Image: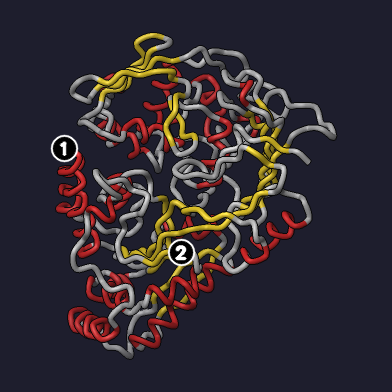
Amino acid sequence: MRVRRSIVCLIPALAILLAACGGAAGGGSSEGGGSSEPASETAKVFRVAYTFEPGSLDPALATDNAAGSVLYHLSEGLVRYVGGKVVPGIAESWDVSPDGLTYTFHLRDAKWQDGQPVTAHDFAYSFLRLVSPDTASPVADVAFDIANAAAYHAGQVSDASQVGVKALDAKTLEIRLDHPVPYFVSLLAGQSAFYPVRKDVVEAAGKSYGTDAQHFISDGPFTLESWQHEAKLRLVKNPAYWNASAVKLDAIEVSVVPDSNTILNMYDNGDIDAVLNIPAGQEVRYPDHGVRWGGSIAFLEFNLAGKDQAAGKLVGNLHFREALSLAIDRTTFVHTAVSALSVPTTRFAHPTWPGTAMPYASEYAVPDTAPLSGDPQKAKGLLAQALQETGLSADKLPKLTFVVFDNLPRRTIAEALVETWRQVLGLQNIDIQTLPIPQAIQAGFQGQFDIYYQTMSAEVDPYLFFRYWTSTNGLNWTHWKDATYDQMLDSANRQLDPAARLSALRDVEAYLLAHGPLAPIAYDRTTYVVRSGVSGLDLSTPGPDFDAIAADVGR
């Protein structure tokens, strides 16, 4: 399940709302997760590890891949991705009005883990809570295609009944859109923000909802038996799930292990059953490894306001940012510092985005993109132009802070880039600041950076990625606000003809490349390895990092 992420696609967790309060809100066991299978030598448990734990399991607040994958197994939305395709979830069918504006979902008989029915009222409550200004969801914008959702979120509409979400009865949910959205069902399947939550449980838990096993309730294939923070989450089969007969596993264990090499050692020692992302260069140890698109785009993100005013004067200059980008030989840099598997790029069009007759990237080319090999001479000229425009001198430049995650791969990337800028442009004013992942994310949200190496989900449609950089998007940390860009993107997404819409989105991409606060670097591809005896594990994209709902293990 793609959440921000990346925010990953590695947009990992900002640890929000972690205050605990007493009392079990979700029902079930004393651990808060429902009935677990008895421990035994024959229990079927799939074990995996992440380098970070979920920031929150509240669907309205989840922003990272670990949360997305865990929620995918704990929750069931109206629809879900299976094998890269959208399939019915709690909604067994749906209708779309001829004008493409009204979706009517017909719900199956389904239950929460405590046996209460899952109703259309639960979905209506969840969607309205997502866009409520009181929730302060960082991902509320995923629902802004719904009529009046954006206005309600902004406080321009105060009556929630004016938002285009309504439970017609317990089994029928109506969603009215502001304009036709051809990928709307895919959006519902691909965003954990659209999972249902139950009003009584959420209100009893307050801000603790989604922070531990006692304050969470499942309607999906598994329940949350326990969550030892910074150590392990244990999910157990949910007997109340409508399709429980299709679930073969007794449990899923997600360990939190900050060091990726330790994760490899755990796999070698038989302590986990899969490594979802083998560190670059280590795949040679596993001749049976697989390769897949990572589903993310890696890029440099610039804070136009700067960490301080002096830095903002420099980073806010377009020609300075262009100089940094053009100084990079992406082919050499990506294959030596990022991964030999990653694909260097100077645009955002992900290879998995569909066009009308062929992939979007091939069908809708962007003219005049920078060469993959860079252009050192032009970069030097742009730097000179930037210094002239800002009135700064090369020997007295303000210090810039380059924030990266405190792990070896990101440190290697940052060091290679800083060395490139030193050699090509003579810049000696860029300091690398490595921070633990939660603190790095916090620094991003608070604008405490000048340059940031970011990876984010490519999503399933160009619009879904491009909207991150609108003036009001909560994940636009760059302080770049461009009314022309906002208008171009909104206009493009309202095009009814698919080819005209994608052509307009290509123009949006070109504008973002020419004026925006980003420098695309690479499309991630990752290697993985799965233990012999594990069957039915789905690692396709789009969707979660892993799908173990139909998996089985034999040891």
Q: Residue at x 49, y 75 (%)?
A: 336
Residue 300, disc: none
Residue 515 appears at what percent x and percent y?
21, 63
User: What colour scheme does the image use?
Assistant: secondary structure
Q: Is residue 305 visible?
A: no
Q: Hey, what amino acid is under mark 2?
A: Ser
User: Where on the picture, by quarter, is residue 184?
Assistant: top left
Residue 497, disc: 1
Residue 157 appears at what percent x and percent y?
24, 28
Q: Residue at x 48, y 56 (%)?
A: 441
Q: Hey, what amino acid is under mark 1?
A: Asp
Q: From the viewer's perspective, is 313 left or right of 507?
A: right
Which of disc 1 and disc 2 is earlier in sequence?
2
- Are the residues flagged by discs 2 and 1 in contact, CB closer than 8 Å? no
Residue 321 appears at what percent x and percent y?
28, 72
Task: Identify residue for label 2.
Answer: 342
